[in-house]
Amino acid sequence: MRIAVLALQGDFEEHEAVFKRLNVSTCQLRQKSDLDLKFDALVLPGGESTVQGKLLRELDMFEPLRSRIEEGLPVMATCAGTILLAQQLLDDPVVHLGTMGISVRRNAYGRQLSSFHTIGNFAGLKDVSMSFIRAPQIEFCNPAVEVLAEHNGRITAVRQNNQLAMTFHPELGTDSRVAEYFLSEML
Ligand code: GLN
């Protein structure tokens, strides 16, 4: 089994480190030809969604990745990755991959709360470590989307068939259970 990590920008190395701890091999997607590598699932890391979306288009990786996701490739998206998957951005006319039935507001926590750490329930798992860094908010979900986590009444993790998306960073720290959920429930 091999997990591809989109490695254009953002914290892709932290995601790779989690899978390494779980003895799962990874490969980096940096250019179009990397899409020919053999992999079973995709991680879209946090970072800056505008930069990632622009690079995906410039490098001609946008369409092939979008169709692989629509064909059922398991994908785990965190933070900026979630913005890339959203069908609608509430404060931005641009839509990126748009494969997931969620409406997302970027930088939704304002300046005061822009970065914080908490623990919470995720898909029945207790006290999962969650770091929020200039996090977006999932404001609406269509009926195909299942809510897996919430924090203070805000939706923080969702799943739609092969797509898992969250507004926090589960890859920071030593708690690997979100990645384990992805591997065991979605691959
Ligand atoms: N604020 C970033 C964006 O809009 C996301 C932040 C993150 O990925 N930690 O893309």
Image (cartoon, rainbow, N blue to C red):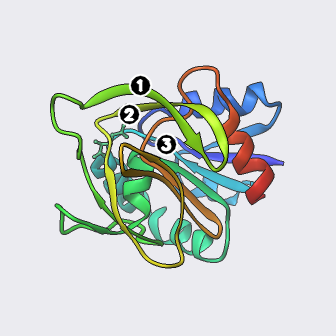
Q: Earlier in the sequence, mark 1 or mark 2?
A: 1
Q: Of the residues shown, which amino acid type is indicated by label 1?
A: His
In this rendering, the count of numbered labels is: 3
Label 1 lies in ligand 1 vicinity (Cβ under 8 Å): no
Q: Examine the rendered structure and indicate whether residue 54 appears above or below residue 116.
A: below
Q: Residue 125: give its label.
A: none
Q: Residue at x 38, y 33 (%)?
A: 132
Identify the residue position indicated by label 2 in the image.
132
Asked if residue 32 lies left or right of residue 161, the reply is left
Q: CA distance from mark 1 to mark 2?
A: 6 Å
Q: Residue 117: give its label.
A: 1
- Cβ atoms at labels 2 and 3 below 8 Å apart: no
Please rate how many residues cluster around mark 1, counting C-alpha atoms within 10 Å: few if below 14, some from 14 to 19, many from 20. few
Residue 11: image location, x then y, percent: 47, 32
Q: Of the residues shown, which amino acid type is indicated by label 2?
A: Phe
Residue nearer the viewer, 60 or 140 = 140
Identify the residue position indicated by label 3 in the image.
45
Residue 21: image location, x then y, percent: 76, 25
Q: Say if residue 176 shows up in the picture.
A: yes
Q: Residue at x 34, y 26 (%)?
A: 116
Q: Of the residues shown, which amino acid type is indicated by label 3?
A: Pro
Quadrant field for ligand 1: top left
Q: Regarding mark 3 in the picture, which secondary structure is present there?
A: loop
Q: CA distance from mark 3 to mark 1?
A: 18 Å
Q: Earlier in the sequence, mark 2 or mark 3?
A: 3
Asked if residue 103 lies left or right of residue 159, the reply is left
Mark 3 vs mark 1, foreground winner is 1
Residue nearer the viewer, 95 or 135 = 135
Label 2 lies in ligand 1 vicinity (Cβ under 8 Å): yes
Residue at the extreme top: 174
Give the quadrant of residue 117: top left
